[in-house]
Image (cartoon, rainbow, N blue to C red):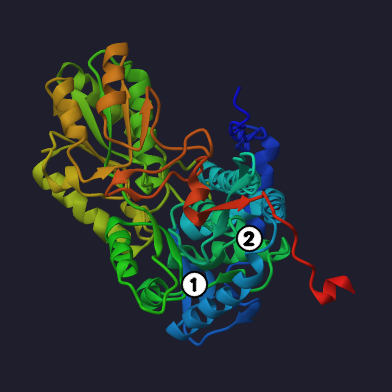
Amino acid sequence: MSDSKQPTPAVRKAEPFRNEPHTDFSRKENREAFQTALDDIAAQLGGEFPLVIGGKSINTRKTLASINPSRKSQTVGVVASATSDHAEEAIAAANRAWESWRYVEAAIRAEHLEVMAAEIRNRRFELAAWEVYECGKPWAEADGDIAEAIDFCMYYAQQMRELGVPVQCDYPGEENSYSYRSRGVCVVIAPWNFPLAILTGMTVAALVSGNTVIMKPAEQSSVIAAKLMEIARDAGIPPGVLNYLPGVGEEIGPVLVESPDVNMIAFTGSRAVGLAINKQAAETDPRQRGVKRVIAEMGGKNAIIIDEDADLDEAVQAVVGSAFGYSGQKCSACSRAIVLEACYDAFLTRVKAATESLKVGPAEHPATTVGPVIDQEAFDRIRDFIAIGKDECTTVVATDVSELAEEGFFIGPHVFADVDPDSRLAQQEVFGPVLAVIKAEDLDQALELANGTEFALTGGMFSRSPRNLQRAREEFEVGNLYLNRNITGALVQRHPFGGYKFSGIGSKAGGHDYLLQFLIPINISENTLRRGFAPPPDDEKA
């Protein structure tokens, strides 16, 4: 009988995780509480927000004005705008702080995230109200974003507690330990469309993993980012571990990405910017400590396939919700409906009626389902795509919001039919309330059309056929596939989110392996068959 001991596989027990419930706005007390929060924040609009580097607040000569998309004349806040010198200062502060933060126990870092989650929960309606004003998010969309930020804090804290326990694989005479170390300084470059959730998710993933962070928010949502900085400081995150660096991306982005003292970049945004960051980071500087890690979550051109036997009542509701929720300004939004010929006409009739029933208006109005787009640049770009649709396709819905557009960046929902699968409307990301409907002869062609873009982020299919649903599982090239339901609204843990092709570089946000991107695995093996012991040093004898 062999006396060798077989290694025992490590088992990590996960504590129960529960997603933060969304607010039920059908309840009068919730509506009144949210309206009170909106009124309170309205009285605070126009304030000033400095940079925070190494724990110090810094005002700058140049500033950014954050504008309410629902009311172009209203300034939400005035934010300090960092220069390249500030970027270098933030990198140095983060590097200094990493020398101590990297050694803080994983469980203690996790506690900081849980304190942040508690503070976000306590300030939930306040933070959601800021999003309504700064990013034009209707009530439910803003509330959902805050809930997701809480989820990221709680889930990543749980995950790091498990990853913080070394995995042992011991044999007689030898001890083997598998553990993780942090990478160093992480630059977080966040988008404006999920202004607290995505910013929080990338930031706390880096922090809980033992990295230090330079937080560069989108210009359009820098006030909400300032609120996250406040919350982190109140939660006891030490100076320099998290630095708040708003500014113009074209000015400070290259400094942050190319610095030899930055070890990784976590980015969410457009394909063009994501690829540029990846290229810049790949240029090796002789002074850097190692190869930089880039996590880039990029765009999508997402499709929902409507099978000929689909329940059109459910399919239309899901397509409309996925296409026009938050004015189509989600990387997961449905921008293409690929409909089989047998139900094409019926689908168009119903989607027209459903789209025309949507309420377009200022985000602070509780009845609004479609608010404004984010800014003038987005407004002009989306209008150009609408012009293409009117010129090349059949217009099914063209919502007129000209009166609203005088006051804010409003574009009503548009639906175009008979769209050429190779056209710009079918291939390029619009990031606005525009839906292209494409006819397919059969499921073979539908899947070919669905996969026929550079992206692979989200997709969906409505069908009553188990065989056809199985084909979608096997052949639909997306990172997140949704069957017989809407394709937006991913929840942490339940729907880990992220794509491939030109939709993403990295793992899935809110998934069990996401933190591994922020960590370096280390294996330590020790021979325990000692032959005598070395005498202790003189200072230990004393």
Q: Distance between the residues labelled 1 and 2?
A: 21 Å
451 versus 137 height, above or below: above
Is 473 positioned to the left or the right of 175 in the image?
Answer: left
Q: In which quarter of the image is residue 419?
A: top left
The dot on residue 118 is: none
Tag nearer the camera, 1 or 2: 1
Q: How many marks?
A: 2
- Report the amino acid beneath label 2: Ile
- Which residue corresponds to the image point at 20% horizontal and 51% vertical from the top-left? 385
**Circles 1 and 2 in contact, beta carbons < 8 Å:** no
Spot occupied by residue 259 in the image (x, y as percentages of width and height): 41, 76
What residue is pinned by disc 2? 41
- Report the amino acid beneath label 1: Pro
Where's the C terminus, which quadrant? bottom right
Looking at the rendered structure, the secondary structure element under dot 2 is: helix
- Which residue corresponds to the image point at 31% horizontal and 24% vertical from the top-left? 473
Spot occupied by residue 227 in the image (x, y as percentages of width and height): 61, 63
What residue is pinned by disc 1? 246
- Which residue corresponds to the image point at 21% horizontal and 35% vertical from the top-left? 451
Q: In which quarter of the image is residue 24?
A: top right
Where's the N terminus, which quadrant? top right
516 versus 450 height, above or below: below
